[in-house]
């Protein structure tokens, strides 16, 4: 109980259970819709409803959390998610399921806000980068493990829905038993989408593309597998190796952007997504091991786009704007997620199961061309101006609070407080002056008499 009572350990266990259940349910629902004979476009709309709910949840759940507290909010969100999971098995109807997925998306967004806010309050500047890495590993392992639960029972049985519901409910237990921890603040964004687009059009469009691609493969990947004649075990393996690809390749792909113009790495990654997607679309009926290898690469490139987008935008904003910028990028990615399954389903209707990867190839190629255009229109920042790459997952904007790139300003600000400082006081100027050994003279020269 001592380990479970530690707030960070408890939080990671809760996050693992939450993502295991969520990973299971994404694939379970896609398989069930395919086996029930749902039109692919209808299945895409149901999948999209979840991400629309997640987008809305990011906007409204903060008020709920601030109103009733973190533990009660997490309990409410997890309970609704658990109830929705079981409700899918009671009544099979696309409109009913769409409503349930919408509600689930709202509550998943709220649960992740609670988890990441709590994690922000439990870490220090010395370990926040490590905690972000652990959080991402737990998330990907949870989602990959969730795919394998598909092998327990047929998608038409009540068992898998019950397992998902149990896992969602169990996610409550570690946090409820943990010792109290101070949660981080739910800071609203100060940067609008329009401002972010002016600052970094490529970063925002890349985030939108990453959301569209990720949501399409999560919502429609199992349907692709079913239409391609794969067994349940094969579909679970396909989805799992894609998740592991996202975990294994995200960091090395991203680190390349620390040594080259980040836009070049983004452009190459986008065209690589297009090439790998096209290869999958034309060869998925061929060799199984080659297909799995392509899925590993596809997952790695696909899931690297979002952190690359954040890193690119962060190269053009102040360190103090990292969190609000990340919130805007998350909104762009969520908008892409809301549209991706619908458009991906349309491609599948027109071209068969391989149409899902034709859609990915189209998105990768189109945004890659836009990236080339931006490279011509704007000079690249120097290597010194580029910040270091940090791996990210598209969860909530509060994950940006764990980003070590913003820690220095954040830690210095509360300690430089003086009632006599002028209204136009700038912490950045103090820091720059301190580096030159002039901080004391600067404060004396600029303080009120």
Image (cartoon, helix red, strand yellow):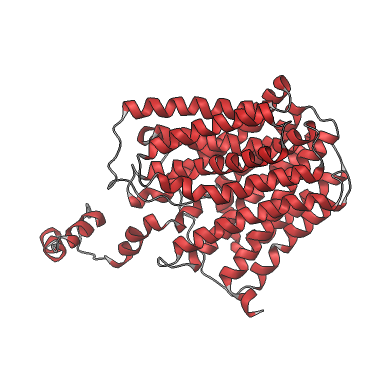
Asked whether residue 394 appears in the rendered view, the answer is yes
Q: Tell me which residue sits at (51%, 58%) in the image.
A: 133
Asked whether residue 77 appears in the rendered view, the answer is no
Which sits in the foreground, 331 or 131? 131
Image position of 5 with respect to 329: above or below: below
Q: Tell me which residue sits at (60%, 65%) in the image.
A: 11
Count of numbered marks: 0
Quadrant where the C terminus lies? bottom left
Quadrant where the N terminus lies? bottom right
Which sits in the foreground, 328 or 23? 23
Q: Position of residue 382 (x, y in %)?
A: 27, 42
Which sits in the foreground, 118 or 347? 347
Left or right? Give the position of 318 relative to 297.
left
Which sits in the foreground, 286 or 150? 286
Q: Tell me which residue sits at (60%, 64%) in the image.
A: 12
Q: Please tell me in which quadrant of the rendered image residue 51 appears.
A: top right
Q: Tell me which residue sits at (78%, 34%) in the image.
A: 95
Q: Position of residue 38 (x, y in %)?
A: 81, 30
Image position of 419 with respect to 32: above or below: below
Left or right? Give the position of 129 relative to 417.
right
Residue found at the very far top of the displayed protein: 350
Q: Position of residue 241 (x, y in %)?
A: 66, 47
Q: Please tell me in which quadrant of the rendered image residue 428 appears.
A: bottom left
Q: Position of residue 165 (x, y in %)?
A: 78, 55
Image position of 27 with respect to 226: above or below: below
């Amino acid at each position: 109980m001592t380990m479970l009572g530690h707030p960070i350990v408890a939080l990671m266990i809760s996050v693992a259970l939450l993502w295991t259940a969520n990973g299971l349910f994404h694939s379970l629902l896609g398989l069930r819709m395919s086996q029930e004979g749902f039109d692919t476009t209808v299945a895409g709309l149901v999948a999209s409803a979840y991400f629309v709910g997640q987008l809305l949840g990011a906007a409204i759940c903060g008020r709920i959390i601030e109103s009733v507290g973190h533990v009660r909010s997490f309990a409410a969100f997890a309970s609704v998610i658990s109830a929705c999971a079981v409700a899918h098995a009671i009544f099979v109807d696309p409109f009913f399921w769409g409503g349930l997925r919408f509600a689930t998306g709202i509550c998943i967004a709220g649960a992740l806000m609670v988890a990441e806010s709590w994690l922000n309050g439990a870490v220090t500047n010395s370990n926040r980068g490590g905690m972000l890495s652990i959080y991402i590993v737990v998330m990907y392992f949870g989602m990959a493990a969730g795919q394998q639960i598909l092998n327990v029972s047929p998608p038409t049985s009540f068992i898998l829905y019950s397992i998902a519901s149990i896992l969602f409910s169990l996610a409550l237990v570690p946090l409820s038993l943990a010792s109290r921890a101070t949660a981080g603040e739910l800071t609203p964004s100060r940067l609008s989408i329009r401002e972010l687009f002016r600052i970094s059009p490529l970063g925002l469009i890349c985030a939108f593309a990453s959301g569209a691609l990720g949501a399409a493969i999560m919502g429609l990947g199992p349907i692709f597998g079913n239409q391609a004649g794969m067994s349940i075990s094969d579909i679970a393996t396909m989805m799992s190796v894609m998740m592991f690809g996202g975990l294994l390749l995200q960091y090395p792909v991203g680190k390349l952007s620390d040594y080259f113009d980040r836009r070049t790495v983004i452009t190459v990654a986008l065209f690589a997504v297009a090439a790998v997607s096209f290869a999958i679309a034309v060869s998925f009926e061929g060799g199984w091991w080659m297909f799995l290898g392509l899925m590993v690469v596809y997952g790695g490139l696909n899931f690297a786009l979002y952190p690359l987008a954040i890193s690119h935008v962060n190269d053009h904003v102040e360190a103090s704007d990292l969190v609000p910028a990340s919130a805007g990028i998350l909104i762009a990615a969520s908008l892409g997620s809301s549209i991706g399954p619908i458009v991906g389903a349309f491609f599948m209707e027109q071209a068969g199961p391989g149409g899902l990867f034709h859609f990915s190839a189209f998105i990768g190629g189109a945004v890659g061309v836009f990236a080339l255009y931006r490279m011509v229109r704007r000079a690249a920042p120097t290597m010194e101006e580029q910040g270091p790459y940090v791996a990210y997952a598209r969860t909530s904007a509060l994950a940006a609070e764990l980003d070590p790139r913003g820690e220095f300003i954040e830690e210095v600000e509360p300690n430089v407080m003086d009632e006599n400082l002028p209204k136009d006081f700038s912490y950045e100027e103090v820091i720059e002056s301190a580096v030159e050994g002039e901080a004391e003279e600067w404060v004396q020269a600029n303080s009120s008499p």
